[in-house]
Each structure stands twice: as structure tokens, then as C-alpha cells.
Amino acid sequence: MKSGFVAVAGRPNVGKSTLVNALCGGKVAIVSDKPQTTRRRIFGIANGPDHQLVLADLPGFQRPLDELTERMQHTVDSAFEEVDAVLFVLSARERIGAGDRFIASRVFALGVPVVIALNKVDRLKAGHIAQQMTVASRLGPFHALHPVSAKTGDGMGELRDELVGLLPEGPLYFPEEQRTDLSPELQVAELIREKALWLTRDEVPHAVSVEVEEVEEKVVRASILVETESQKQIVVGKGGAVVKEIGVRARPEIEALLGHPVFLELKVKVRPKWRRDASMLERLGL
Ligand SMILES: Nc1nc2c(ncn2[C@@H]2O[C@H](COP(=O)(O)OP(=O)(O)O)[C@@H](O)[C@H]2O)c(=O)[nH]1
Ligand SMILES: [Mg+2]
């Protein structure tokens, strides 16, 4: 039995969470086109007949701006302390530049094998992919470099085999049927937040958090927290249209997660400066 931990690093939006989901064969981490979607460390667990690969999906490296981002950066730093390998994700669709080199300087200093995944190669021309692979290969002494598409699944089998090959002999860290370390309540909260992220923009996504109050047999009660009255108006929408749409999109996924139908009761609440409030962050599990 081979088992171990692999930290996932890379700039915001390169597809880290999408990759973790693809490797785990199901949704463990929420995905959006907004930066800072991933706020906490999430373990995605990929089980095979002879292995357990635990992937740590992480917030992006960033300069801390407030208590929330400070905690996020601490999460990232401590996650790298004891891993068997790093999966360094790049986007083939964007220029590989200073942001990637900054992360490279950190991951190549860890002293564990670094596997580079050049993601988002779907619909890119072979020449363009080759060019990006050359640029990627200059980032540091990588162990392997895989062009992949987390979206189409292209190259993912090879990437998974590569990572499993780097794991030591070890025990099962999680029960085989478990795909993430998040509690059902936190998974529900994340699913709701994902829908809120897709339906809002500008500063609103950064100001949104979700607190699940109750997961009962038939009812899930949750609050969407924002920082100001005007953000609340946006998230509620005209005649409640936006919060309703969040519910319409989140409910089927919550039902799939819990395995039964539920009534989803969503409220939108103003919690001024929750991102700077240590006790609020504790309550949200951040
Ligand atoms: N075309 C394409 N888009 C992708 C791929 N992987 C992720 N994305 C998109 O990139 C955006 C950011 O993905 P996400 O996983 O949240 O990135 P993260 O911030 O690195 O975790 C989302 O809109 C994804 O749908 C891919 O392989 N191909
Ligand atoms: Mg993410």
C-alpha cells in the first residue's frame, strides 16, 4: 500500500481545485472564475486498489491584507511542511511569468519532488503547448512535467500514476469511502458559496461567506454573510431573484451530497468586517 500527501500549488485560477476534483473522481473543492475561491485547506482523497493519494488543495499564495488572508497564507505555509511531493499547477492559456516564478522559488526550495501540471491544454494548438512546456521547464528542477486538461481529463491518468509513484509505503489515512476531510456542513456551505461566487462580481465574491446553521432530515438552513448593506442588496437581488437563483443551483448538489431531497432555506445577513473578526473566522472554520 502506497499512501501520502501532495500539496497543490499555483497561481489563482490556474485550475488547482478543478484538478483535485478530477483526480478524486468527484467534487471535493468548489471552483469559480473568481480569485480567492479556495479559502481553506481541503484534502481531496483519491483511492486506488493499492494506494491512497491525499491532495491538499490550498488558497493561492498572496500578500496578506486582513485577518482572513493572513490565515489563508498561514494555511498555505503550514501545508507545505510535511508533504511527500508538490503538484505545481500552471495554466497553458496564460503567460507563465513573475507570479509563477514566485511560487516556483518556494516550492523548489522544499526538497521534495515537484511535478508540474501544465493545465488547460484543451483546444490549444500543439505548437503552443510545446512552447509553454519549454517555458514551464525553466521554472526549476522539476521531477516531471505533464500537459493536462482537468476539464476534459486529458493526461490525467498519467499525472495520477506519476503522483502515486512518488508516495512512500504507508497506511490508509482516511476511510476508503471518504473523498474529503470537510464535514458535510462545511461541504454544504462551500457549495452555496460557489453559486454565490458565480452570480456576483467585483468586490462582492470576496465579501461573501456562508454559515450553515442546520442540516436536518428535510431542511438545510444557511446564511450568506456579506459585509455591507449594498452587498446584501446585490446578493438578494431584485425581488429576491439572486438569492433564489443561488438556492436553485445549490440545492441539487446538496441533495446529491446528502443523498436525499431537502428544503433549502437561505438568508442573507450583514456582518460588518467579518474578514477582520477573529471570532467570526473561527466560527466559519477559517
Ligand atoms: N478550459 C479549461 N478551463 C479550466 C480547466 N481547469 C480549470 N478551468 C477553469 O479555470 C477556472 C479556475 O478554476 P479553479 O479550479 O477554481 O482554479 P484555482 O483557483 O487554481 O483553484 C474555472 O473557471 C475552471 O472552470 C481546464 O483544464 N481547461
Ligand atoms: Mg481553488
Image: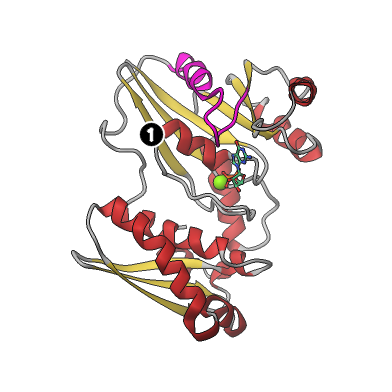
Residue 58 picture location, percent across and down: 54, 43
Query: Image quadrant of residue 128?
Result: top right
Q: Please say if 211 is above or below 113.
A: below
Residue found 58% across the figure and 85% down from its top: 229
Could you tell me residue 47's position as x and y percent?
A: 34, 27
Residue 201 in percent (x, y) is at 65, 66
Q: In this view, does 232 lie above or below 176?
A: below
Quarter of the picture containing the N terminus is top left
**Would you say residue 258 is visible in this rendering?**
yes
Magenta part of the protein: which range?
A: 147-167
Q: Which residue is at the front of the view, 107 or 94?
A: 94
Report the image quarter containing ligand 1: top right
What residue is disc 1 on? Answer: 45
Viewer-proximal residue among 67 and 175: 175
- Kind of residue at disc 1: Ile
At 47% from the left edge and 74% from the top edge, which residue is drawn?
243
| Residue displayed at 59% across by 31% down | 149
Circle 1 Cα neighbour tier, 10 Å, few/some/many (<14 / 14–19 / ≥20):
many
Question: Is there any visible trace of residue 78 in the rendered image?
Answer: no
Is 148 colored magenta in this rendering? yes
Q: Of helix, strand and loop, which one carries label 1?
A: strand
